[in-house]
Image (spheres, rainbow, N blue to C red):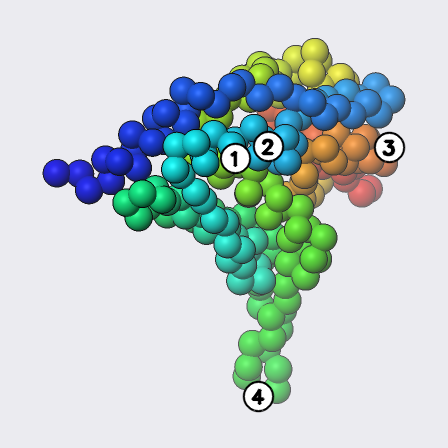
Amino acid sequence: MNTKLKLYQSLAKVRVDMPCVTKGESANIGKYSYSYSSLDKIQKLLHPILMKHGVHYVQIVNSDGLKAGLIMKVVCLETGEFEEFSMSVELGTKQVKYTDHNNREVFEVTGDAYDPQKHGSVHTYLRRYSIVCFFGIVIEGEDNDAGDVASGNKSSYKSDKKEYDPQKHTRVKVGYIETNKFMPKVKEFESNGGGYDFDKKIWFIPRKK
C-alpha cells in the first residue's frame, strides 16, 4: 500500500486546477527581445490552489560555497505525507594553484562562488524551476522557446547566429545567468567580437594572435 496516496491525490487536483501561466514579463534591448514568467506571478496563482487542496511546501537554501542549492519539501497537511528533493547549480570550481614550501596544496576558486548576487540569482531560479517541475505547471510558449534556442530560430531570440570556431575563438566558462540577463550577456560578448553558439552552447571570445 502506498502511504503517500492522499498526497498524490491532492497534487493531482492541484494540477487540474492550475491554469497555464502566461509570460507577463518582457525585455527589449535593441535587436534582442524575450519574455518570461516571474516567480511571484507563479506563486500568486499557485498558493490559493495549494491551500484549497491542503498542500504546503517549503524551500530551504542549501549551499556549500561552490554550489548554490535548494531543498524543497511538499507536504499533505491532512496526513503529514511528504516528498522531498534537492537541486543545485555549480557556481565555481576549486583547483590546486600551487604547493607551498611545506608541501601543502594551495587552492584557487574560480567562477562566481564568492559573488552573493550570483547566489541570489541562482536561488531565485531554483525556487521557480523546482515549483514549475514538481507541480507540473505549464508556462505558455515554453516549448516553442526551447525549440527556438536549439534551432537558432530568431523569432524569440533576435540575434545574428554566431558559430564557435576553435581556430578563431577561445572558449570562455560562464556561470549561471538569470533568464532576463541572458540576452544582454550575449550582446556584451558580441560587442567585444565574441558571442554565444546556441547549437554548441559555448561562450567564446576572439583568439589572441
Circle 2 is placed at which residue position? 44
98 left or right of 3 in image: right
**In whole angstroms, how far apart are the C-alphas of marks 4 and 1?**
57 Å
The location of residue 187, given as percent across then percent down, is 81, 30
Q: Nearer the viewer, mark 4 or mark 3?
A: 3
Between 195 and 21, the residue placed more toward the observer is 21
First-in-chain label (2 vs 4): 2
Q: Is residue 140 above or below residue 60?
A: above
First-in-chain label (1 vs 3): 1
Q: Amino acid at mark 3?
A: Ser
**In whole angstroms, how far apart are the C-alphas of marks 2 and 4?**
57 Å
Mark 4 and 3 residues: CB-CB less than 8 Å, in contact?
Answer: no
**In whole angstroms, how far apart are the C-alphas of marks 2 and 3?**
38 Å
Circle 1 is placed at which residue position? 47
Displayed quadrant of residue 157? top right
First-in-chain label (4 vs 3): 4
Q: Amino acid at mark 2?
A: Lys
Circle 3 is placed at which residue position? 191
Q: Nearer the viewer, mark 1 or mark 3?
A: 1
**In whole angstroms, how far apart are the C-alphas of marks 1 and 2?**
6 Å
Mark 4 secondary-structure assignment: loop
**In whole angstroms, how far apart are the C-alphas of marks 1 and 3?**
43 Å
Residue 101 shows which numbered tag?
Answer: none
Mark 3 secondary-structure assignment: helix
Mark 2 secondary-structure assignment: helix
Q: Nearer the viewer, mark 2 or mark 4?
A: 2
Circle 4 is placed at which residue position? 102
